Image (spheres, rainbow, N blue to C red):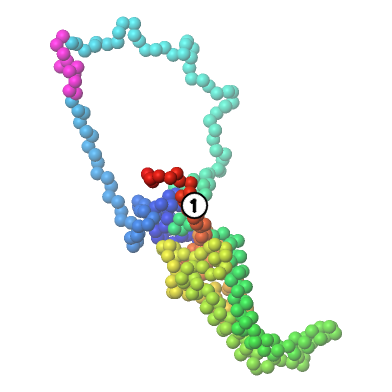
Amino acid sequence: MSVQPGWYVDPADTETRRYWDGEGWLGAPIPVDATPPDGPPPVEPPPAPVAPAAPAASTTPDSATGAPGWSPPQGPPPGYGPQPGHGPGWGPQAGPPGWGPQVSPPGWAPPAGHPGWPGRPPEPRPHGLRLAGYGRRFVARLIDFGLVFALNVVVNGWFVWRWAQEWAPYWQEVFRRAARGDTSADGLPMPGEQAGSLLVAILLIATALWLAYEVPSMASGGQTVGKRVMRIRAVPMAADQPLGVRRALSRWSTLGLPTLLWYCAGLGLVLQLVDSLSPLFDHPLRQALHDKRAQTVVVEVPYRTEPAPSNDRNQPPGDTP
């Protein structure tokens, strides 16, 4: 998929930012910490032609006038001439028999790549940060799902138990008939009227718990607990700043709201699976569908190196320089 037009950090020089029009870079780079203008950069006027400078007149006494009695040399000294070559019969050396200039095989062409880069383009670095790998993102999501599941066990456990009780007579009879080899469905006990209401309540509570767990933490710092453990975070593509509530809610709703559609023959689960696998097929920014909707990208959090504390005991006594 193509990258949306906008101002991005130049992969060739992470200290500058350039405008990407969807097919190539436009205009001159600007410092990475400068605020980019809205839209593409203005077209630069062509440079004005420079007239060649006139040769400066020589002011040495040996110029055209010269000193009294001086005359310019008439030619090379006697006996001087062009230097001969490397000897009689010398000429350019030919290659061995059968040798000729190397040519490309028929039908060969250089590999396609980004305009201006031969071969494969370098990996983009949004705001100078490396893109998060698929493995880190997968493990972070597993950690978050585990924590949300634990919240559901505490808050939603009673509703799940009541829903299972409504369906228990039906499944017990199905297994009893299967053990006898009876495949008929006549006379199976159906669940009570509360089964449907309980399922809707379970899905609403599960969705609300996921919303309360993810949106506030993503809005403030771009990280959930799982992302903090795996040292990754989500940042806007426009600038390295917090997502904010609106962007965090837009990002979560693409993946979280389909939970309510689990009631429709598992349709919501299919939509969530497609969204979760979408980064595998997105290049070069590895954006999931929820990233594309919120215009975010997931990057690695660099390790901060603390400066070594100064040890005054090793300094010699006396005045400091």
Question: In the picture, residue 269 is in which quadrant?
Answer: bottom right
Q: Is residue 100 magenta?
A: no
Q: Magenta region's main secondary structure? A: loop
Q: How far across and how far down the image is residue 135, in percent? A: 60, 61
Up-down: is 157 above or below 13? below
Instruction: Say what amino acid the circle numbered 1 marks.
Output: Ala
Q: How many marks?
A: 1
Q: Is residue 18 visible?
A: no
Give the residue at x 39% y 59%. 7
Specify the farthest residue to the top: 78
Q: How far across and how far down the image is residue 153, in percent? A: 64, 81
Magenta span: 58-69
Q: Nearer the viewer, residue 313 or 169?
A: 313
Q: Is residue 68 magenta?
A: yes
Judged from the image, the secondary structure of the residue bearing numbered disc 1 is loop
Q: Is residue 246 visible?
A: yes
Q: Quadrant of the C terminus?
A: top left
Specify the farthest residue to the front: 317
Give the residue at x 65% y 94%. 193
Give the residue at x 44% y 49%. 12
Question: In the picture, residue 105 is in which quadrant?
Answer: top right
Q: How far across and how far down the image is residue 66, in percent? A: 17, 15
The residue carrying mark 1 is: 308
Q: Nearer the viewer, residue 108 or 228?
A: 228
Give the residue at x 60% y 79%. 151
Q: Is residue 165 rendered to the left or right of residue 273?
A: right
Q: How far across and how far down the image is residue 148, in percent? A: 59, 76
